[in-house]
Image (cartoon, rainbow, N blue to C red):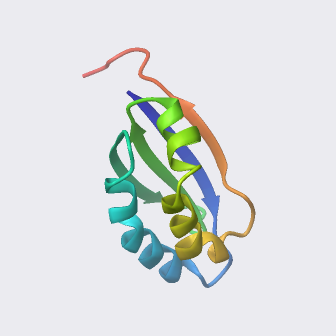
Amino acid sequence: MVTEIAQIEVKPGMEAEFEAGVAKAAPVFKRAKGCKAMRLERSIEMPQRYRLFVAWETVENHTVDFRGSPDFQEWRALVGHCFAAPPAVEHIQEAVKGF
């Protein structure tokens, strides 16, 4: 299992529109090959900063399958206009399980 973390800075005043777009995009992720879950979190200190967490079976499910699909274009059409800058994306794996 791999988790994609995308840090997304949203243009001022577009927070509600961005959140609505992410909610509309949930089915896009749900049908994506290898996608297991997705959630969006918002910074308390910096309310224009979000982190999108997407669980994928493999990195390639995100970087090849999803990014190369029409679903990626639909995702970007729903939210891309809200971005203040391109998202910073990384992939992580669990190293040590706490509890």
Q: Quadrant of the N terminus?
A: top left
Furthest-top residue in this view:
96
Q: Identify the residue at horizontal 38%, vertical 74% (top origin).
A: 24
Q: Is residue 37 left or right of residue 80?
A: left
Q: Is residue 57 left or right of residue 63?
A: left
Give 94 or 23, whichever is nearer the viewer: 23
Q: Identify the residue at horizontal 56%, vertical 72% (top origin).
A: 79
Is residue 64 among the parts visible in the rendering? yes
Q: Position of residue 46 (x, y in %)?
A: 60, 63
Q: Position of residue 38 (x, y in %)?
A: 37, 51
Q: Position of residue 41 (x, y in %)?
A: 44, 57
Please say if 44 is above or below 2: below
Please say if 81 is above or below 47: below
Q: Identify the residue at horizontal 32%, vertical 55% (top origin).
A: 30
Please say if 17 is above or below 63: below
Give the number of marks. Answer: 0
Q: Is residue 26 left or right of residue 42?
A: left
Q: Quadrant of the C terminus?
A: top left
Q: Identify the residue at horizontal 67%, vertical 80% (top origin).
A: 12
Give 19 or 25, whichever is nearer the viewer: 25
Is residue 44 among the parts visible in the rendering? no
Please say if 44 is above or below 88: below
Furthest-left residue in this view:
99
Q: Which image quarter: residue 20? A: bottom left
Q: Is residue 44 left or right of residue 1?
A: right
Give 4 or 41, whichever is nearer the viewer: 4
Q: Which image quarter: residue 9? A: bottom right
